Amino acid sequence: MSDIGEIRMQVMWNRLISVVEEQALTLLRTAFSTSVRESGDLSAGVFDPRGQMLAQAVTGTPGHVNTMAEAVLHFMNEIPRDQMFEGDTYVTNDPWQGTGHLHDITMVSPSFLNGELVAFFACTAHVVDVGGRGFGADGKSVYEEGLQIPIMKFAEKGNVNLDLVRILRANVREPNQVVGDFYSLAACNEVGHRRLVDMMKEIGLTSLDGLGEFIFSRTRDAMLERIEALPKGSWSNELVTDGYDEPVKLAATVSVRDDHVDVDFTGTDPMSRWGINCPIIYSKAYACYALKCMVAPDIPNNAASLAFFTVSSPVNILNAVRPAPVALRHIFGHMVPDLVLGAFSKALPGKILAEGAGALWNIHISARPVAGASGRRAEVLMFNSGGMGARPELDGLSATAFPSGVHTMPIEATEHTGPIVIWRKELRPNSGGDGEFRGGLGQIIEIAATEGHEFDFSAMFDRVNHPPRGRDGGKPGVAGVVRLDDGTKMRPKGWQHVPAGRRLILELPGGGGYGDPLKRSAEARANDRSKGYISESE
């Protein structure tokens, strides 16, 4: 290819990125649920007619992006090509064909130019409610966890399936928000389609085959170069988490071959009877993300780069099969990067960060007036983050969502959704593990219902009984705490009640430290004390 051809392809590649970024921004701007609008709990991407991901939007979580990359193929298998029409949009929330649990809605839309299928657009978002028991770990099977939508058409030739909309409204607690999010997802793909067609017409393209080959060939060459530079062999790691009512062991073996990297979850504990199981599509998504962070963080994430990673597992809690309850699949899915990186630390000593809080401290609040009082009912979802582990040359980031990457919800936006007050939201002193480099701090959050109201909440917390471990001599982070303001200890998982007049206090875990604490500089410790990160006595 000539230099002019190379430049032209690079310009088209950059233009394609702008297409998917605008696609994602459409969802952010039009979404009804705060988890999407304020936190960016979504994904968006464009695929070639064979279902291979060409590009993803930067906005979005690895769990959504990498499951979406596989989900499009499931849609293509279910809906024959001769039943795909211009103006179609397809939908599912199947945990095993989508993104791992029922609260995530995945939509796929074919994109046509002059009557020819040239691409697919896909997007995913977490909705506030899907019926059933609500967002929590208490279900005994997926059938209790909410409404299941098999792969089907949300719209055909531009006409929305109103029967599906009526079913949605009859089965969820927040019908306006949920149905609104469905239309937002459809609009997201429509904007992507329009921008792609505009781009192809402007440039004179009739297909994306040439651009796809340009993207994939360079990605393959770059990935192969990175993998060839890695040490070859197999390394294993185990990680113990809180589980629901008993600890759960996660295990992984990472094997670096000549031309790919494999992760095997053999040795992980069996499936749970509680809704903390994780379908393999989601475990794989975060395993690939961890590998990508280590092997090639600067190489585009697409079908070609993901093809260098393979993930396998017997049936266990990281490879749960239907009809296992999977509502809180994110907890162990978010632990997978620490698990995989812990194995990689044996292959690449001195280069891997310490363990962090990992799983988001999500909380779903169901608020209502006390008996005999008038007031407002609402379903409120909050995403909260503990501290990241310290890095080989830097302190860990505080209250930062790694590996999910979602944003913290502003207090004002959260309070607007229901009758609750966030009385306190601040960094948690002394929670980061000590070391040459300190672990990131967790945070303290204090929540109460407004006067005349009470609430139930679904706890989705971990690292309460098993704090994040330090690395290379670093100390562990401080474990999380869940309690009421009167000292009553609450469980880290499951639906529980907060009476009127009481406050729920969440103390999120800090990240593990890195390196010998005796090597931490006096200047760094003084800086920590001056900012209140550690107490004067530390």
Image: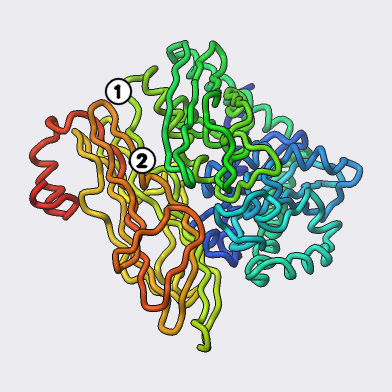
Q: Residue at x 60, y 37 (%)?
A: 13
**What quarter of the picture does the N terminus occupy?**
top right
Residue 95 x, y percent position in the rendering: 67, 45
Q: Which residue is mark 2?
A: 466
Q: Residue at x 59, y 32 (%)?
A: 316
Q: CA distance from mark 1 to mark 2?
A: 24 Å
| CA neighbours of label 2 inside 10 A, class few (<14), some (14 to 19), many (20+) | some
Is 291 in front, or is 263? 263
Q: Earlier in the sequence, mark 1 or mark 2?
A: 1
Is 159 in front, or is 251? 251
Is 231 in front, or is 360? 360
Residue 500 x, y percent position in the rendering: 41, 78
Q: Residue at x 44, y 73 (%)?
A: 415
Amino acid under label 2? His
Amino acid under label 1? Gly
Q: Which mark is residue 350?
A: 1
Q: Label 1, secondary structure: give it.
A: loop
Q: Is residue 62 above or below residue 162?
A: above
As drawn, the residue found furthest toward the right would be 82
Quadrant position of residue 53: top right
Residue 12 appears in the picture as rendered = no
Q: Is residue 257 left or right of residue 349?
A: right
Residue 375 x, y percent position in the rendering: 52, 85
Query: Which coloring applies here?
Result: rainbow
Q: Residue at x 33, y 41 (%)?
A: 467
Residue 495 appears in the picture as rendered = yes
Q: Label 2, secondary structure: give it.
A: loop
Quadrant position of residue 273: top right
Tally of numbered discs: 2
Q: Is residue 472 above or below residue 100?
A: above
